[in-house]
Image: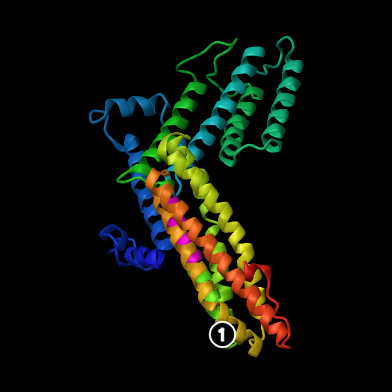
């Protein structure tokens, strides 16, 4: 395998043609804009689908007509759909779970309230005052707990918006509620219709995230991880090339700073994809193994950013004098060997991550490359210490360099 394995992979990916659908949404011009535009179009199409039960004649779809008539499907389904659909299938499933959880909590609370206080507040009935104040305390406690506890955003939104209407209906005896009383379960009641509305909206959102093809967080995790691994190797190579050069170039220093900032910014997008992809595999199978390996990559990237920041500080502080030039001539080739070996090892790691696990040949190859890397690091350290000692014995000032650069 050539020493530029990661670079070759990057070029191969760049040479791949963008699909016609991607070009239609301008992803070849601006990827972020294209993804947002595609999501907006997908949402608009499915909102029309959501509206069809209200528009279709009774003869065309009797089931749709009955669902709308019995209020098991209404405009609130579209609201659930809008709040649930997001950029990846994993995120959409996550938001759907949050919305359904909030609705279940609200429905369960009004069911309990109507069980303990059948009919809600009714002036002139026995214990009416007690029911009124008990309902207020219950409702205020519910709102406080939902805001105070660390619930998901969708869970809070839908639990509060659903329950507050129930709460007001409980206290306003003029409002027909349709709730079941005395702990009974009413399949055609208001609470059950609310559950059906929430379920329909969330299910349509999940379908929208998967049709005509799924917007998998796992795929975005793969693409982001590969980009970061390859970009990390490129940035390390650029830093070493500059530091081992002859001139102090402020323009190049500025470019290196921007490269590091861009890499750090991109790295922040990997962790959310790792989290969202759990909902696409439910913590099972090969995809879960890939998630666990990318978690290790994410931690490794964080460590590398800290080291690169130290290297950048060293580059900015270096004077590039004669001592620097003399030392770099001695160790430049060894530094290049270390970077090349790191790239080879990262390339093998990337291949095995994409294969969702390590096989025997992959482990053997990684072990071999690790030994080569350790040998190149030892060679660099030995040559650096030897050169520094010789330069000191020749009466030159001891060359100092940060641990991040020398390691």
Image location of residue 163, percent across then percent down: 60, 30
Residue at position x 57%, y 70% in the image: 380
Q: Quadrant of residue 325?
A: bottom right
State the image coordinates of residue 312 (x, y, percent, origin top left). 63, 74
For the C terminus, the quadrant is bottom right
Report whether residue 244 is seen.
no
Q: Position of residue 83 (x, y in %)?
A: 49, 43
Q: Is residue 398 magenta?
A: no
Tell me how the rendering is colored. rainbow
Check if residue 222 falls in the magenta segment. Answer: yes
Query: Which image quadrant is residue 385 in?
Result: bottom right
Residue 330 point in image, percent of width and height: 57, 80
What is the quadrant of the N terminus in the image?
Answer: bottom left
- Who's the residue at 35% across and 42% down the image? 210
In this rendering, the answer to whether 360 lies above or below 11 is above
Residue drawn at point x = 57 percent, y = 32 percent:
102
Disc tally is 1
SS at mark 1 in the image: helix
Query: Residue placed at 52% from the left, 55% from the top?
Result: 269
In the rendered image, the vertical position of residue 238 relative to residue 342, given as above or below:
below
- Residue at the bottom extreme? 322
Magenta: main secondary structure: helix
Q: In this view of the protein, which residue sits in the foreground, 38 or 342?
A: 342
Does 287 sit left or right of 331 as displayed?
left
Which of the 4 image quarters holds residue 162? top right
| Residue farthest left in this picture | 59
Which sits in the foreground, 235 or 157? Answer: 235
For mark 1, what is the residue? 251
Residue range in magenta is 221-233
Closest to the observer, 213 or 74 = 213
């Amino acid at each position: 395998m050539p020493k530029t394995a990661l670079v070759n992979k990057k070029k191969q990916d760049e040479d791949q043609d963008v699909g016609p659908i991607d070009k239609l949404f301008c992803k070849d011009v601006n990827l972020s804009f294209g993804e947002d535009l595609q999501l907006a179009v997908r949402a608009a199409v499915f909102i029309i689908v959501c509206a069809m039960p209200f528009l279709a004649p009774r003869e065309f779809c009797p089931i749709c007509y009955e669902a709308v008539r019995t209020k098991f499907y209404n405009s609130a389904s579209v609201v659930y759909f809008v709040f649930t659909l997001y950029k990846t299938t994993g995120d959409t499933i996550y938001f759907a779970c949050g919305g359904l959880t909030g609705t279940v909590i609200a429905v369960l609370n009004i069911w309990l309230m109507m069980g303990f206080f059948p009919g809600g507040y009714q002036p002139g009935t026995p214990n009416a005052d007690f029911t009124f104040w008990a309902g207020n305390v219950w409702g205020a406690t519910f709102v406080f707990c939902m805001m105070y506890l660390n619930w998901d955003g969708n869970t809070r939104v839908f639990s509060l918006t659903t329950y507050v209407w129930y709460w007001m209906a409980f206290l306003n005896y003029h409002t027909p509620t349709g709730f079941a009383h005395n702990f009974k379960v009413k399949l055609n009641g208001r609470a059950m219709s609310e559950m059906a509305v929430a379920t329909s909206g969330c299910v349509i959102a999940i379908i929208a995230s998967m049709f005509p093809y799924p917007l998998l967080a796992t795929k975005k995790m793969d693409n982001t991880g590969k980009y970061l691994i390859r970009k990390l190797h490129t940035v390390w190579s650029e830093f070493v090339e500059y530091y081992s050069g002859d001139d102090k170039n402020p323009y190049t220093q500025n470019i290196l700073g921007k490269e590091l900032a861009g890499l750090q910014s991109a790295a922040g997008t990997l962790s959310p994809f790792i989290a969202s992809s759990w909902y696409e595999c439910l913590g099972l199978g090969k995809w879960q193994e890939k998630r666990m390996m990318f978690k290790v990559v994410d931690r490794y990237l964080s460590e590398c950013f800290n080291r690169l920041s130290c290297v950048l500080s060293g580059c900015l502080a270096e004077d590039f004098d004669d001592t620097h030039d003399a030392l770099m001539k001695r160790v430049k080739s060894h530094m290049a060997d270390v970077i090349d070996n790191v790239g080879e090892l990262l390339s093998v790691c990337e291949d095995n991550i994409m294969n969702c696990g390590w096989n025997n040949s992959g482990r053997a190859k990684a072990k071999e490359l690790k030994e080569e890397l350790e040998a190149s690091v030892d060679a660099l350290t030995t040559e650096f210490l030897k050169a520094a000692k010789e330069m000191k014995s020749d009466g030159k000032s001891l060359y100092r360099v940060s641990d991040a650069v020398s390691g």
